[in-house]
Every structure is written in structure tokens, then in C-alpha cells.
Image (cartoon, helix red, strand yellow):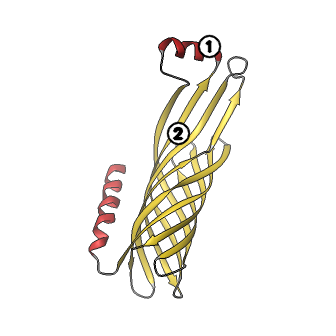
Amino acid sequence: MKKIALLAASAALFAFPAAANAQAFVQIEGGLDVAQQGGESEAGIQYGVSAGYDYDLSNGMFIGVQGSYGDSSARECAHDMFEANDRLCLEARRDLAAVVRLGTQIGARNKLYVLGGYTNTRVGLSYKGETADALLDAIGGFSDAGAHETLNGFRLGAGYEYDVTSNLFIKAEYRYSNYGSDFSRHQGVLAVGTKF
């Protein structure tokens, strides 16, 4: 089901350019990323890029598709877990999303919208300690012991977009992503982009 949703969103992303009044855009973005796992949360900086198309409907409404790639510095570490001076860290890593946006044009330069769709993230676990360092040195080529897991989920959000010029816009967006497994993210994103 998740693969079908991702394929449908990807197909929609490429189908929109055929429409005469579809507007393509690309943006760079950054903001706050709060990763939550099992009642614990850790904040970091989110950064990435997004691209998509918006299609004008009647009565000032629009619909669009957007694909995003991001990464994060959100990380929670515990020390002295198994031996003195060791470190065990849980890290929120790359974040992919394919969403549909639905909104309204307010005046000539403002847009309000909601969004929803599919998201996929990678979560990493790393360990550094004297015993692990000695073992990894013996194996060679490794600096930390670690593992990662890829999680699938859904994203919901809302945003405001302002056209600075006919081709340049700025945006503020809130995103909530839930991946099951008691892991979720709250992101507050500011973006600047161009339309073409």
C-alpha cells in the first residue's frame, strides 16, 4: 500500500506539468526539528529542499504536489551506559516526503494551505566506547559502532506562502510526521523558493 501511494504521488508530480496553468517551484528550507521517541524528545535543525507543482482551481483554490528531501541535526545521547566515558546516541537522519497541498489564494500574493501525504525517514543509533573502539580498530575501517532503521509514515501540515515577486516566494510551514513505532517529528520550516 505504501509503495502504491508513493508511486501515485510520483506520477502526479510528473503529470501536473501537462496542465496549462500548472506552476512549477523549487525551494530551499530550514527550521526546527523535534524528534520524539517513547516520551522523550530532542530538538535540532532541519534543512533540505523541496520541489513541486501547483495547479489553479476555480474560486481562488489550488491543488499541488510536492516532493521533499531533508536532513536533521536532532540527536539524543546518553553517557556512561556500559562503561565509563562511553556514548550511545539516537539520531534523526534523512527525511523524504511526497505530499498533496490544497489551499486558497488570498489576494494577489498570499496562499494558505494544508498538506498531507507519505513520509519516510531514517533513524540511526551509534555507540562509542573504549571496548568498542578496540574491537573496531582490530576490524579496521570503522570509527563508531552503529545501526539504522528506515521508517514509513504519514505527514500532515499547514502553511503560509507569500509572493515577494512574480517568481520569488517565502514560506512558513508546520509539519507533523508519524512513523508508528512510537516515533514522530514536529517541524517548523521557513523556506525561500522560485517559480518557473
Residue 149 or residue 39, whichever sits in front: 149
Q: Amino acid at mark 1?
A: Thr
The image position of residue 10, as x and y in percent, is: 33, 59
Q: Nearer the viewer, residue 154 or 69?
A: 69
Which corner quadrant of the image does residue 183 belong to? top right
Relative image position of residue 121 (x, y in whole percent): 48, 46
Q: Which mark is residue 131?
A: 1
Relative height, residue 88 to residue 103 (above, below) = above
Nearer to us: label 2 or label 1: 1
Could you give the CA–CA distance between mark 2 and mark 1, rounded to whole angstroms? 24 Å
Secondary structure under the numbered disc 1 in the rendered image: helix
Image position, residue 164 (x, y; %): 55, 79
Tell me the amino acid under the disc marked 2: Val
Residue in the picture at 49% in, 80% down: 104
Within 10 angstroms of label 2, few (less than 14), some, or many (20 or more) residues? some
List the residue tagged with mark 2. Answer: 123
The structure residue drawn at horizontal position 53% and vertical position 16%, both measured from the top left corner, is 136
Kind of element beneath mark 2: strand
- Label 1 packing within 10 angstroms: few (<14), some (14-19), many (20+): few
